[in-house]
Image (tube, grey):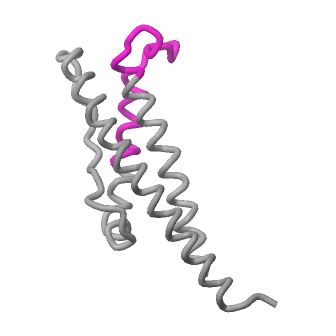
Amino acid sequence: MESPRHGILVTWSMEARLAQLLGSIISTTTAYSLARLEFALRHPELPSPPLIDRLSNASPVTLQEQWTHIEGQLDAVRAFLSRHDDCRRKRAVYDTSFAWLQRTTRELDQYARAVRWVLTIEEGR
């Protein structure tokens, strides 16, 4: 038989994990912004990669208010990368600014999937 205290620990654990994920997203969004700037400076002939807003903090309230919008921005970045990769999908091999943009986007995507998983678990409770 589970104790009520165990349930509290599970909830606290999920909240702690979510706060860690959001902190990682905030720092990776900063790295993405720098990668975006470098790409735009190296390729003035191309449109700038889409913006991704930075979460103001790692709180559940901020997450609820901003998450859907940030997921949409991440979708736009993935589409941008797909449109501007070369026909062999190998641009990152010879374009370091594109590689950095691609790497930070993949990292954000991994964190976003983890956040979505946590949100889905929390909604099921």
Residue 115: x, y in percent? 50, 59
Residue drawn where x is 45% and y is 29% of the image: 103
Q: Is residue 72 magenta?
A: no
* Screen quadrant of the C terminus: bottom right
Residue drawn where x is 49% and y is 63% of the image: 18
Q: Which residues are magenta?
A: 73-99
Residue 34 location, quadrant: top left
Q: Is residue 7 above or below residue 68?
A: below
Residue 122: x, y in percent? 56, 74
Please give left or right for residue 94 compared with residue 66 in the image: right
Residue 81 location, quadrant: top left
Task: Determine the main secondary structure of the stretch shown in magenta.
Answer: helix
Q: Is residue 71 above or below residue 93?
A: below
Residue drawn where x is 53% and y is 62% of the image: 17
Q: Is residue 82 magenta?
A: yes
Please give left or right for residue 22 compared with residue 57 in the image: right
Residue 8: x, y in percent? 60, 84
Q: Is residue 119 above or below residue 78?
A: below
Residue 63 location, quadrant: bottom left
